[in-house]
Image (tube, rainbow, N blue to C red):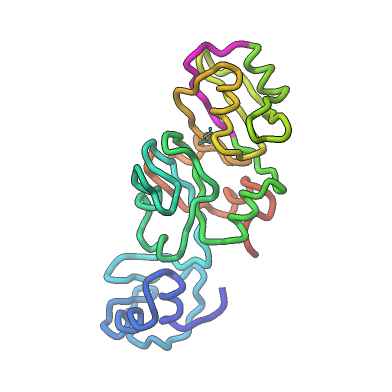
């Protein structure tokens, strides 16, 4: 991040339009590294700078990369219709910065959901060209059988898809649970692939994206965390904007 004025920095972090930020600074509501700064033209090195607004700490970042452990009954859409949106689980500053879910999970699917305001990152993560594998654990109504695993691995023809879609890998976890790794992210893909084999999906959890696993993040459902560089590099090589 380039050097910038305090006013511009607050705007870039999502604290509001220029005049609102100027007024917050002049009113003495903003401190930088523990000192109140009332000069909105003060020039600063923003990356990782600790500021406080009304006593609330905020570490400045050029882009936001977070992972949410999505609970059921939240929608990934920016204009949710039947359930609250996932953005309601995150600080309002994130929405002000145009942070968006990277791809979508169904309202009843739980688990790992990435969110970011870095357009390049969102594109790389969601683009089929970049092949970021996603791992799901599906609970099936009917018992898991060796045939189910074999069919998911060999490919299933879904309506409106020109070619059969196959899992990258697939293994039985217990009598009614199967782990499926997919390279594509087609609409309702896991549920539709299971349905095509006569299995109804009772519950679906996304447990990993690339090599980043939910179990290593220690996140309760509904909680989120920022991703550090090491975690970001597990998603895919050079995932983030330089
Ligand atoms: N596949 C599905 O069927 N639903 C999801 O939410 C994700 C993958």
On the rendered image, what quadrant is the N terminus found in? bottom right
Determine if residue 168 is in view: no
Place of residue 160 in the rendered image (x, y in percent of width and height, measured from the top left): 65, 35
On the rendered image, what quadrant is the C terminus found in? bottom right
Instruction: Please tell me which residue is depicted at 69% across the width and 51% down the height of the picture.
Output: 237
Label total for image: 0
Tell whether position 138 is magenta: yes
Instruction: Please tell me which residue is depicted at 30% across the width and 85% down the height of the picture.
Output: 26
Place of residue 76 in the rendered image (x, y in percent of width and height, measured from the top left): 45, 46
Query: In front here: 134 or 225?
Result: 134
Query: In front here: 161 or 77?
Result: 161
- Please tell me in which quadrant of the rendered image residue 28 appears: bottom left
**Where 106 falls versus 120 (above or below)?**
above
Instruction: Please tell me which residue is depicted at 57% across the width and 30% down the height of the picture.
Output: 190
Place of residue 62 in the rendered image (x, y in percent of width and height, measured from the top left): 52, 67
Q: Relative to residue 186, is residue 77 drawn left or right?
A: left
**Where 221 falls versus 84 (above or below)?**
above
Q: Range of the magenta residues? A: 135-145
- Please tell me in which quadrant of the rendered image residue 187 appears: top right
Place of residue 182 in the rendered image (x, y in percent of width and height, measured from the top left): 64, 34
Instruction: Please tell me which residue is depicted at 49% across the width and 21% down the height of the picture.
Output: 139
């Amino acid at each position: 991040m380039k050097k910038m004025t305090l006013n511009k920095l607050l705007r870039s972090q999502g604290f509001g339009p220029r005049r609102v930020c100027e007024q917050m600074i002049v009113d003495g509501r903003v401190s930088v590294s523990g000192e109140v700064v009332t000069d909105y033209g003060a020039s600063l090195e923003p990356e990782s700078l600790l500021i406080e607004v009304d006593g609330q700490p905020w570490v400045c970042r050029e882009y936001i990369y977070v992972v949410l452990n999505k609970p059921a009954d939240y929608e990934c859409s920016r204009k949710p219709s039947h359930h609250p949106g996932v953005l309601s689980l995150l600080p309002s500053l994130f929405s002000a910065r145009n942070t968006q879910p990277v791809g979508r999970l169904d309202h009843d699917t739980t688990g790992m959901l990435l969110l970011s305001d870095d357009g390049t990152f969102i594109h790389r993560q969601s683009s089929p060209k970049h092949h970021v594998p996603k791992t799901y654990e599906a609970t099936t109504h009917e018992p898991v059988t060796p045939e189910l695993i074999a069919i998911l691995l060999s490919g299933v023809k879904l309506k409106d898809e020109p070619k059969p879609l196959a899992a990258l890998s697939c293994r039985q976890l217990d009598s009614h649970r199967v782990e499926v790794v997919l390279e594509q992210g087609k609409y309702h893909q896991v549920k539709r692939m299971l349905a095509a084999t006569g299995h109804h999906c009772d519950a679906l959890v996304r447990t990993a994206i690339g090599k980043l696993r939910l179990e290593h993040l220690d996140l309760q459902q509904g909680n989120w965390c920022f991703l550090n560089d090491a975690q970001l590099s597990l998603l895919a090589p050079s995932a983030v904007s330089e």
